Amino acid sequence: MAMKFLKKQKSSKQMGVPCSSPKRDTLVMSSDGSEEPSLKPLEDIKSLEEAKEEIRKLRQIAREASRENAELQHRISTISSSTTKSSSTTSSIRRVKEARAAVLDRAGSDKDYVKTSIPKSDQVRNLIYHSIKRNMLFRTCSEEAIQDLIDAFDTKNFAAESVVIKQGDEGDLFYVVEEGKLDVMVTTNAIDAGDDGSSSREVQVGVPYVSGSSFGELALMYGSPRAATIRAKSDCILWFLDRRDFKGITGSHKQRREEIILDTLRKVKIGDTVLGDVLRSSDIDAMALATQSDSFAKDDVIIRQGEKGDAFYIIESGTVDVFVAEQGIEPVARLTSGQFFGEKALMSEDVRQATCIASTDAKCLTLTREDFVRMLGNLQDLLNNGEQRPSSSSAATRGESDAESMDTEHSSSTRFELSDLDIKRTLGIGAFGRVKLVKVKSEKVSKGENPTQTYALKCLSKRAIVDSGLQDHVINEKVIMSELNHPFILTFHCAMQDDHNIYFLLEVLLGGELFRTLRQEGQFSESWSRFYAASVMLAFCQIHSRKIAYRDLKPENLVMDERGYLKIVDFGLAKKLEGGKTWTLCGTPDYLAPEVILNEGHDWAVDYWALGVLIYEMAAGTPPFYAEDPMEVYEKILSGHVTIPSHFSRGLGEIVKKLLKVYQSKRLGRTKGGASSVMKQKWFSGFDWGSLLNRELEPPFVPDVKDPLDSSNFDSYEEEDGNDGLLRKPCNWNPAEFS
């Protein structure tokens, strides 16, 4: 196993931080399994070059140690502040929750995008090109997409002292500096002698932006408040790119590329069999997912006749000449974009029947037999069983016979009118409204099936929904929740509406959010973490079997009932995947999968990535990619490197690494076996899945719930004006789905 060791200082048990004596080491592993260098004993260093190499290694270890120490100090700070049972603790937890709010790209649909082209000199094009190529958001863009993006950049002049962007304003523009210098200013709260004891002051941070610099990249991902004010220090010429242009161009290029790949894979013929005739569409999707792009220079030999092969190639760009030794020195064929070769390697260790040489610079999509088997199993078996394979089967549940047998139904027929309910208090606040604790009025009790007659009423402002353009999301949430019935998924009872709000009547869970318990405990033991992760896995079995991607897994969206069993709540970002992938950027920054960040299209594989983050956060106390700056979080996520704490067992470290694979084709849960492959991991060895599903396995923590109206496990909120405390902003949007 690839590893390197760093010494870690002892920490305090009283703070809930995992203790490690100086004799225990923190294990640093890369998720791709690459080997890390180890230090030589001093007596083995024989030359100046060897000494320099050892110094380089020491610097690398020092950087890792510094980073780990910073993360440890953050964990100590977080745990210390969250273990004090006080109002300040509640405020602290609430601030952390606000900082971890889900994000959603509300840009227009790619299908509505019309390409724009702004004239610019070759010198400017070159400056923009080199600037954006350094940025992670452009990392996977093709050269064609890069040129289209450069076309879309527009220009604007700013006079000295003018403000380009203002801290706190929501932005949708990314900038590249052509001329001039700009300062980065941040407004902070400072203590002074004022009446309220505080004031705001503006301080300069970092180094000024100059020609070739870029800023504002977060605005290309989603609308969020600017983190700083950028002020022109001199007269400036800036080039800017709008988020709609960025999403439209990158999305259209990547979707078009994927369509070409899928179409080519369907046409691949092995012997007398065309893959598209015998494989399910989900199988073809999985093949496409496992391909990787390789570049070849002119005259490079891609495959050589007589050698054993293990890879199949699809030409993306350029041309490839085919030579057969027995037929002379001239090529027998010239292959171009969209054509393929080496397909027999998917079946077995094929001996190449020809030599293929790049006749120009070429890019090929490569699919190895190993990756194919990891995703789908043996190709010959698939071809043999092709006619018996049901086309309607979901890729999400392939190989999950055990998981499918755990699927249960407990549908609800509860139906009330708003006038039947007494509003008690607010349990939580969201972007579009509140969740209320409600009780059925005594004269209406016979209408319900809930013996306690208490429910949660999710109240969403129609005006806020329409102003945000998210009507389809709310309708989608209702449709999805109506489909799901599971012991570990919040029960949906009915939907209602009036002139002001949309209402969801839901099962009430009074045990509180897992997030709150985690902050109070500091971190969970492995047995606690395993119990909660298993509950999520069982819920995922049903969610994914219905071709739904949940897309917002985190401790805040896992709520306990009065017995301590978890349920997944809040399906506002869930998506029914009818056509393979979806392209909307959404989720919580610490939990975003790499394919979401890079706008590559995603499916339910993002839920398994998030499960890896959740398991890590439960067992360690902080997420694996934590940073104050969202862009730094995304850089860490894309790096694929995960630091495994020394107190993690081997089984825990392994499952986290397997779930946090940057490439979806290698990610546990997305590979052959699906959810069953997760449930069969060593970390879950001996776990009683059936008892958990039947709610017979004792939860590790039982919340204190005194009665059906006890909301003490939730924060306190001020109620709104009005006799029932509900939002009162009229709107003429009246969807039929809520009538």
Image (cartoon, rainbow, N blue to C red):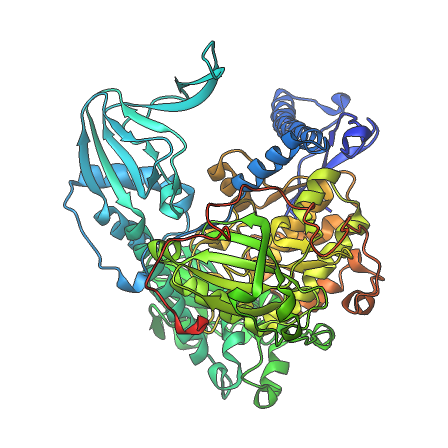
Q: Residue at x 65, y 32 (%)?
A: 87
Query: In the figure, 123 relative to 488: above or below?
Result: above
In depth, the one of 357 and 703 nearer the eye is 703
Q: Position of residue 679 (x, y in %)?
A: 74, 64
Q: In the picture, which quadrant includes the C terminus?
A: bottom left
In depth, the one of 110 and 44 nearer the eye is 110
- Is residue 131 visible in the rendered image? The answer is yes
Q: On the image, which quarter does residue 12 sit in?
A: top right
In the image: residue 725, left or right of residue 369: left
Q: Position of residue 103 (x, y in %)?
A: 46, 49
Q: On the image, which quarter does residue 309 sit in?
A: bottom right
In depth, the one of 599 and 662 nearer the eye is 599
Q: Residue at x 57, y 73 (%)?
A: 415
- Exactly how many numbered labels are in the figure? 0
In the image: residue 97, left or right of residue 722: right
Q: Position of residue 693 (x, y in %)?
A: 76, 68
In the image: residue 225, left or right of residue 441: left
- Is residue 32 visible in the rendered image? The answer is no
Q: Looking at the image, which residue sits at the far front?
A: 443
Q: On the image, which quarter does residue 211 sit in?
A: top left
Query: In the figure, 455 relative to 59: above or below?
Result: below
Query: In the figure, 252 relative to 66: above or below?
Result: below
Q: Position of residue 228 (x, y in %)?
A: 38, 29
